[in-house]
Amino acid sequence: MPRINSLFTKMAVLTSFAALILNFAFFGAFHYYSITTDTRTRSNFTDYVKYLVKDVGNPPQKANAEAIATRAKLFAKYESPAGSWTAGIFKDDFNDRKLFKFYDKDGLSIASAHGYTRIISATDNGSLTLLMSPEKGEISGLRILLFILCGMVVVMLFGLLFFIGKMLSPVRKMFAAIEEVKKGNYGHKILHKGKDELAQLCCMFNELTADIERAIRSREQLLADVSHELRTPLTSMRVAADMVEDNELKQSLIEDIMSMETLTGKVLESARLGIGDKALEMDSVDFSALAERCVRRFASMGGKIQANIGDGIKLCANSLMMESLLNNLLENAVKYSVNSHEPVLLQLSADADGLTVSVRDKGQGIPAKDLPFIFEPFYRSDSARTRNTGYGLGLSLCKKIVEMHGGTITVKSEESVGTEVVFTLPPLLIKN
């Protein structure tokens, strides 16, 4: 069903309005022409009326009027000071208010419209009125013709709307394709045949998404290769650093090398998730036990975490990825709420809608302008850069892991209030 503000709806309304105005214009012009133009037929009809009036006589004779009324199927009425009479049958549906007067000379007035005619002739002592009505068959035939014409207009209008819909189908396909690309599905293609501008636009869109997909894969492959090659020299540097006699310099070197090793590990992990189309290796995961293990790990390092974990929540998932997911979320929450007296809150709930996990902190929060980009690799907000903490890969990894398991992840945050990250996994992953 097209939306009210869609391009198809706007074009449909515009087309219908234009067709309505065009019909009114044609009908008005034809109607005005038919009742105002002095054609030869109307001149002949005027002569015929004059003969009728002459046959009735002056002064009008009732016997003559009755004979003419029977022959011409009209109604005659004569009014004078000396008396009045009628001849023929008067029809109640005769409406002389809409008649157009096209002749008014020498005491004779003729007005007609849609088969109805009124003739008024001034006589020596009164006035003679003749009323002509169309046959019933003529009116019903006109109505049938009108219904046929209306039906044709309706069919043509719906046919036009159908073709408009077909013409605009690439726009709807492109809208759906953009939604897929926003989800990260760069391999989605628009299947549309044609040679018009919209078809060319679809082809350009497919080429563009293909280029983007190649660029992203090349970037991820490059990061993976560089990170892998860095591991060997980093190991050598760590061995060399241990041999430095200056303890202060040794500690500084070791911290820098460990930081580089952490970054290299995260880049490699991100690259493994982003490159390749291998099927996800799934196994049985005791998610409740895994969450408790992660909480204990951060508690041993001084992190304040309050956990609300249900018992016996088991999943069919990749255990290493699930552990990495929770570790990244808890690490971010603890890191950015270090100045808060409130603990990080971890909540798990499993129901018919799936598994929902919430990690909420009362820390510094994320600026609103940064929220749309926090899942981008290596993206960090300005406030995070000033403290030189993190690499901007944690939430990107979390998003990839959740989506690879068919779930969704969202972030709500407000500066100086805190941040809440919620991810949901589908119910089919929950093991009974």
Image (tube, helix red, strand yellow):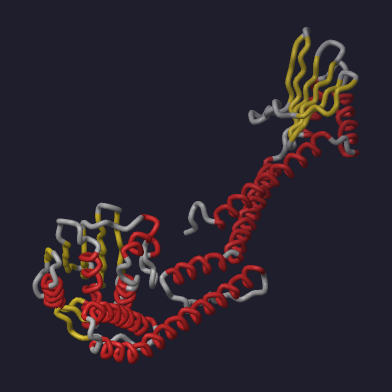
Q: In this rendering, does residue 374 appear at all?
A: yes
Q: Residue furthest front?
A: 246
Q: At which x and y percent is residue 121?
A: 83, 20
Q: Is residue 32 left or right of residue 239?
A: right
Which residue: 58% across, 72% down?
202
Which residue: 90% across, 31% down?
47
Q: At which x and y percent is residue 136?
A: 67, 41
Q: Residue furthest top?
A: 81
* Figure disc tally: 0
Q: In this rendering, does residue 313 appear at all?
A: no
Q: Is residue 232 left or right of residue 49?
A: left
Choose between 209 and 173: the one closer to the eye.
Answer: 209
Q: Is 274 above or below relative to 80? A: below
Q: Residue furthest left?
A: 311
Q: Is residue 209 left or right of residue 310?
A: right
Q: Is residue 83 left or right of residue 172?
A: right
Q: Quadrant of residue 316?
A: bottom left
Q: Is 166 above or below relative to 432? A: above
Q: Quadrant of the C terminus?
A: bottom left
Which residue: 47% across, 76% down?
186
Choose between 160 and 64: the one closer to the eye.
Answer: 160
Q: At which x and y percent is residue 138?
A: 71, 43
Q: Is 268 above or below relative to 349? A: below
Q: At which x and y percent is residue 405?
A: 29, 77
